Amino acid sequence: MPNKIISMAVIRRLPKYHRYLKELLDNGIHRISSKELSEIIGFTASQIRQDLNNFGGFGQQGYGYNVGALYGEISKILGLDKKYNAILVGAGNLGQAIANYSGFRNAGFEIKALFDANPKIIGLKINYFDILDPEDMETFIKENNIEILIICIPKNGAQVLAERAIKAGIKGIWNFAPVDLKVPNGIIVENVNLTESLFTLSYLMKEEY
Amino acid sequence: MPNKIISMAVIRRLPKYHRYLKELLDNGIHRISSKELSEIIGFTASQIRQDLNNFGGFGQQGYGYNVGALYGEISKILGLDKKYNAILVGAGNLGQAIANYSGFRNAGFEIKALFDANPKIIGLKINYFDILDPEDMETFIKENNIEILIICIPKNGAQVLAERAIKAGIKGIWNFAPVDLKVPNGIIVENVNLTESLFTLSYLMKEEY
DNA sequence: TAGATTGTTAATCGATTAACAATC
DNA sequence: TAGATTGTTAATCGATTAACAATC
């Protein structure tokens, strides 16, 4: 199929549908109309129908959407029906926080090892994760089918690290370093920039609303 | 001044200008045109001029922009010319990672205390932060002029926590709990939803680009 | 002055909302 | 069947890009 191009605006709403549908399911709600969903998720009913119809006609006229079925569809759309192997580089506070968050593993993202340049912790096990030497990263990526690199080191080493991991075969980067990585076509980078987020809060607090 | 309304699209670009201008300054570059900046930041020159002109005419025809002056202007626009007192609730892995990130303090955001419901750590000091009892949060907010609440607890307690803190006087919430908080007008919420970010990466990796 | 580059208006593009025929 | 609600087209709104006069 000649994949229709989906705008980033739509893509960034998908995880929110996923989250709210899960909540509905947990609350035993099995059927919902775009109008009802709009009231709890905060998008317009029209936008919800437009968004979903980018991917297929999941609803039924006169009825609405089956919550479980729609949840399943969106899970598939998000690629959550497969497993991903990941490694995390930079086992500091933030790196360990992310590694230990069980939600990611439950969603199919398995962190296979942590890497850290600090010789004092290389070889240790922290919360069931082996801490390995970054020198050995490429070999590990190749031998363990690692698709995702999670970058939790300061900004200075991030670009070089990314390049090494890409050369070794990873396809996606979840980047917590405050730097815009330059990567070849086909490599996906998703940034989490905490400073940018905090500064946005600061801007909005300054305005007199 | 009857504040012109700035779109979120523009607002979310501001921290990026701030970051790149800082980098230019650090590299000893004191003058830049919108065209040159566009090449390093990845926005069009036209967009850069439009964005900046929402806030003032910071450039000079025939010359471009003075990097230091523009950096100062954007710092002010972001509200970084003042200090903010914050508290963080939920001193787990993620909470401690955020509390210990020195960049925030350097930018004027001071975390005055951590709060955690775990009786085993209440009263302790972790990395210079007092761990306090959440029971005492309201009093602490009032006595220490706390403006920002950082939420690092699981989603279930987040809404109630936010309401208590708002009643006690906080104005902004930096929310790491995967839930959309309902807050009164005038209270600012900035969400960091790691799961949504990871799922976006997953979606993009699934597509054959 | 001549050249460069901004500030700003106008044109275009894309995303959201509205409307309604199709249909369950 | 009648009522409800989708899927989808058309209209609107907003954001980005292009163009150029103003001006340093």
Image: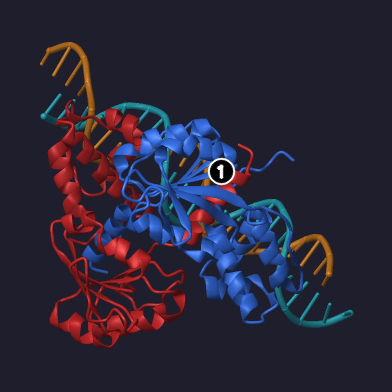
Chain colours: A blue, B red, C orange, D cyan
x 26%, y 48%: residue: B54
Residue placed most toward the observer, A75 or D21: A75
Residue B3 in view, yes or no: yes
Residue placed most toward the observer, B100 or A79: B100
Residue placed most toward the observer, A181 or B31: A181
Which image quarter: residue A97? bottom left
Tell me if B207 is positioned left or right of A88 in this view: right
Quadrant of the snapshot with the C terminus of chain A:
bottom left
Q: Which residue is mark 1?
A: A146
x 64%, y 39%: residue: B208
Residue B43 in view, yes or no: no
The x, y position of residue B60, in whole percent, is 16, 33
The x, y position of residue A138, in whole percent, is 49, 35
Which image quarter: residue A26? bottom right
The x, y position of residue B113, in whole percent, is 21, 74
**Relative vertical location of residue B80 with respect to residue A30 in this rendering, above or below:** above
x 68%, y 53%: residue: A55
In which chain is the residue bearing label 1? Answer: A
Identify residue type, mark 1: Ile
What is the secondary structure assignment of the residue under circle 1? loop
Which image quarter: residue B151? bottom left
The x, y position of residue A184, in whole percent, is 49, 30
Total residue callouts? 1
Tell me if B147 is positioned left or right of A194 in this view: left
**Relative vertical location of residue B32 with respect to residue B162 in this rendering, above or below:** above
x 37%, y 46%: residue: A116
